[in-house]
Image (cartoon, rainbow, N blue to C red):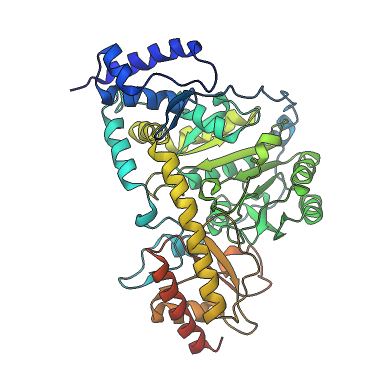
Amino acid sequence: MHDGSSVDELAKQLKKELDRYSPGGKLPSSRALVERFRVSPVTVSRALGQLAAEGLVVTRPGAGVFRAEPQASAAPAGDTSWQEVSLSADATAELVPRAVDASGVLATLAAPAPGVIEFNGGYLDPALQPERAMAAALARAGRRPGAWGRPPIDGLPELREWFARGIGGAITAAEVLITAGGQSGLTTALRALAPPGAPVLVESPTYPGMLAIARAAGLRPVPVPVDTDGVRPHLLEAAFRATGAKVFVCQPLFQNPTGAVLCAERRPEVLRIARAAGAFVIEDDFVRRLVHEDAGPLPRPLSSDDHDGVVVHVCSLTKATSPSFRVSALAARGPVLERLRAIQVVDHFFVPRPLQEAALELVGSPAWPRHLRAVSGELRVRRDAMAAALRLRVPDLAVPHIPAGGYNLWVRLPDGVDETALASASLRAGVAVAPGRPYFAAEPPAAHVRLSFAAVASVAEIQEGVRRLRAACDEVGG
């Protein structure tokens, strides 16, 4: 039976020897390492997994293990001193009640009745989840030395390093906090950056869970419209000027629910406008790992272009794994990091260590890139199947944008069709949809529903769900 300490010892030895290999150079085979160090194949696999999670080696299934290419040099340090003014400014706005309407959140969390097709879900169907890889990672994690002890408050260093590399730019592991899912990260960020009663700028439409967080904190969400190229900068600038807000929450990549991507021309504008207002941008990069196969190169996170600590970045493993795999990261630069850390500690103490260890095991395994590739291909197939079925069976429903990432389509209803009535009729017909009203902080410009193609078991189920939606539309006159 292999000893967990031998894994760490082997990992340390392999790190010492990495300089023998040029970047991209191939390491000895697992069999050679087993014979040389007289350890089990499992010990070798886990030690290499640790090095992969730390970005020191790259595992290529069928080819072997290679030394990773060196990281690009760090970006300029920038100037975060402006944050001291924004973080200490007193709010003069009248306090607002902390009443919360959780209906928009519950619509995507509540399990549908048996036989109901789940077009309202916000997570991958079990058929798309890496269940075997997660189970194996959790089993390996539970045997790690100290796995059941108290973790570092900020999170395991190797996991913080992995998230920092994924975010890119000047972000380092020291500027990353491990949090329990994206919702937790957003809650911490909003509580840290805006006092009760303050306005907070949000995209319109936007994720209902974020609106619920804001209202629970006593904040006043102020909507800024988006189009297919993301938030509209001139309206963002006007909103900052009119409200005096110090926070803007956005999803620049495959925005929920529209699927919009903030275009290259608008990215520097958003940062410039926020910086001029002395404001923070909370970047919810929630779905980067659910890119579709035909998306092409993705834009980098906004935070990778930010040198002055404007962006507080939130990203998560949950959407690409399972709703119960709640491991995410908060990243920020400058004095604001200490405030985020304090609120994170007070609210949650820390993310359970076994889950952090399991995350390291998962992302360091060959199964992780295989899973991401498989999901990428499957989401494209499902997206196309849903779009085609809607065009064929329900052509009166408008789908203005077909996204290249994420898990849903944002559908505009014909004038005169009541979305609440349609949602009720759909449920009677055996398909659950998410009404559009909870996605708006103010009165919506039109009626919508959000349809998920990731929370169902198959393309056949998508086609049957659209057939049932057609029946519901006939019932309400749409």
Residue displayed at 72% across by 36% down: 86
Tell me if 449 is positioned left or right of 266 in this view.
Answer: left
Q: Quadrant location of residue 310?
A: top right
Q: Which quarter of the rendered picture does the N terminus lie within?
A: top left
Q: Is residue 349 above or below residue 421?
A: above
Residue displayed at 38% across by 11% down: 13
Total numbered circles: 0
Judging depth in this view, the residue of 4 and 146 nearest the camera is 4
Q: Is residue 188 visible?
A: no
Residue 203 at x, y = what percent? Answer: 67, 56
Judging depth in this view, the residue of 91 and 25 nearest the camera is 25
Q: Residue furthest left?
A: 1
Q: Is residue 403 visible?
A: yes
Residue displayed at 47% across by 34% down: 346
Judging depth in this view, the residue of 309 and 451 nearest the camera is 451
Q: Which quarter of the rendered picture does the C terminus lie within?
A: bottom right
Judging depth in this view, the residue of 26 and 408 nearest the camera is 26
Q: Is residue 128 above or below residue 76?
A: below
Residue 344 at x, y = what percent? Answer: 49, 35
Q: Quadrant location of residue 84?
A: top right
Residue displayed at 60% across by 52% down: 295
